[in-house]
Each structure stands twice: as C-alpha cells, then as structure tokens.
Amino acid sequence: MKVHILDDWFDTLRSLPCFSKLADHDVTVWTDHQPDPIALATRVQAAEALVLFRERTKIGAELLERLPSLRLISQRSVYPHVDVEACTANGVLLCSNMHSDAPSYAAAEHTLALMLASYRQIPQQTASLQAGRWQSGVGRTLRGRTLGLYGYGRIAGAVADYARAIGMKVQWWSSPDGRARAEAAGETVAPSREAFFATSDIISLHVRLKPATRGLVTPKDLAAMQSRALFVNTSRSGLVEPGVLEAEIARGRIQAAVDVFDQEPLIDIRNPLLAHPNVLATPHIGYVTEDEFDLQFSDIFDQINAYSEGNPIHMINPSVWSRAEGDA
C-alpha cells in the first residue's frame, strides 16, 4: 500500500524498531505540519493509507473528498480530530487501537515531572544559574502533600503509584462509576467535588475528552482551590471551560503546569499560559518519547498490515469494510 505518515516532526519513526513493519509498503513520511486541507490533499493525493500522529492533524470532509485513493486511516487512541461520518461517507475505514490494557507511562512520568519542576522551581532556578545569579528562591517539597487525581483511569493510576512512592497522599474524584470503582479498590475518594478541589494541594486531570467531558472544570472548581495550589493538565485543554484557567491564573492565586492547549501548535508567546510566571508550560510532550512512539506506532502499523492482508482490526466504522467486502 501507499502509506503516508503525517506530522513526524523530528523524523523519528524511521529510526525505531516498529518501522520495519512497513517494509512491504511504499512509505512517505511528512516531517512538517500542513493545516490547510486542500494543500494537504494535494501532497497526499496518492495515499491509500494515512497514519496520524495523535491529534496533530484534523481529518474532515474537505480533505477526504479530495482523496479518491484513500482507503484506510490508521491511528491509536481517541479520535476527536477525525470526522468518522465523513470517513464512512467517503469509504475510508478508520482503525484505532484503544489500548485498554496499559497506561501511557510516558504521560504519567511527565505529569510527575511537571509537579516536581513546579514545586522545586526548576525552570526559574536553572535560568537564574545560567544568568550568573545562583539561587533564585525557595521551592516546596512534594512529600506529605495531597494529590487530587480527577479521573479514575490507567494513567491516573500510574501517577498515583509514582506519587505514593515519594510520600504523597492521594485522593480521587471522578464520574459516579469511577468513584465507585475507586472506593471498591480501597482508595480515598473526596466526600464531595467541592472538598476535592478545596483540600488538594495539587489537582491533576486524567479524563478523556469527549462531548460529555468538554468544559468539565468550571470557574467554581478553580476558585475553590487553595491559595498556591497547583493545577496540572496533561490530558486535554478542552476539559477546562475556555478562558477559565487563564482568568484564575491572572488573579495570581494558584499555579498551573500544562502540557495541552486550546490551539496546538501554540507559538504565540503572548498567550497567558506561556507568559505568566505562575505557569509551567510544555508543548504537548507527555507522550513524546522514543519508547512510547515505538509502542504506539507498532500498533498503528499492525493495523495497516492487517488491512492489507484482508483482516482489518480495531475498526471504528466497520460498515465501510462490510460494504467493501460486499462489492468485492
């Protein structure tokens, strides 16, 4: 198959063991980002399969209608960036392994790294040292602090393990089902949503973004947080109501560490989440490690091979395959 890989910005995949799985295919790797669907359609006109790098490129009707040869989109995890109805209407099968068996340890590690870097003021201390000023202030210790994890899932579970290993206390909030599962597992669940936000030294979000969870975190939630509490988001920016975090940060009362933004890539240095001294921001690198890429794209390339062999797996819109089988 003619396979086009989008948004491999650092040309990483060719150097990973998983890339050998595409040995029998004609592969083109694009190392830049093309947001314009018409321009993108021109460059990938010959593609029979598209490989997506998470949510870096949106896939909609305007693109799909211009790709008559496209038969497969292969990716991993959730797909809010893909118009599934448009895929189906254009005869394009979407395959996405939802990886229900294991967390992203890379994302969990990055969450812990943001907490440590924020509490110990590592960016500020490094900048001070490089400017010849030695120490620039006094940090705080994580041991003994209460970490509030919103969302009772696999990544949050890994973060909880890391936090407990350094002596933190952990409490949870989640959907009713998530809270029930946490309680059944013997975990500490806050008595109320208000208490969760008010009594946690650090709040970390670990919820999948879908229509029901968009805008999950409200102004009331952030206003309930303690002074100098830390809000961490390595999940999705859309989980927080638009502008709410920026407004609370502007008051100078809480701190934040974020890896996700409403607009990505975010290159406007005037954005308050990049400019405010109370925010530690990273450019959506929670999953960006060689190990995580090899794991994720091994699954993605398996989906291409399965389709090529006539036995597609992890189908999101299987009616496309059923229709193709009927036409064969």
Image: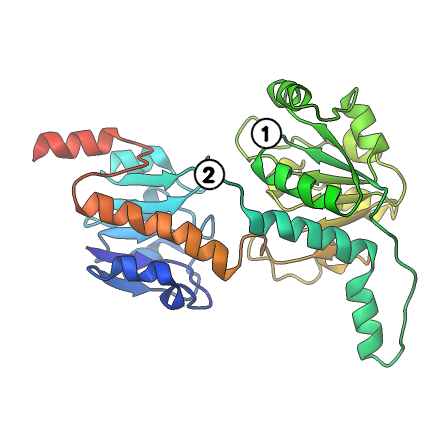
* Residue beneath the point at 29% across and 45% down: 303
As drawn, 277 above or below 72 = below
Q: Position of residue 227 (x, y in %)?
A: 90, 41
User: In the rendered structure, which amino acid carries the disc numbered 1?
Assistant: Thr
Label 2 secondary element: loop
Q: Is residue 18 visible?
A: yes
* Residue beneath the point at 59% across and 40% down: 155
> Which numbered disc, 2 or 1, marks the residue that appears first in the sequence?
2
When asked about the image quadrant of residue 43, the answer is bottom left
- What residue did someone put label 2 on? 80
Kindly identify which numbered label has been placed on residue 213. 1
Q: Is residue 1 left or right of residue 264?
A: left
Q: Is residue 279 visible?
A: no
Label 1 secondary element: loop
Q: CA distance from mark 2 to mark 1?
A: 12 Å
Going by the picture, which residue comes out furthest to the right? 138
Q: Position of residue 134 (x, y in %)?
A: 89, 76
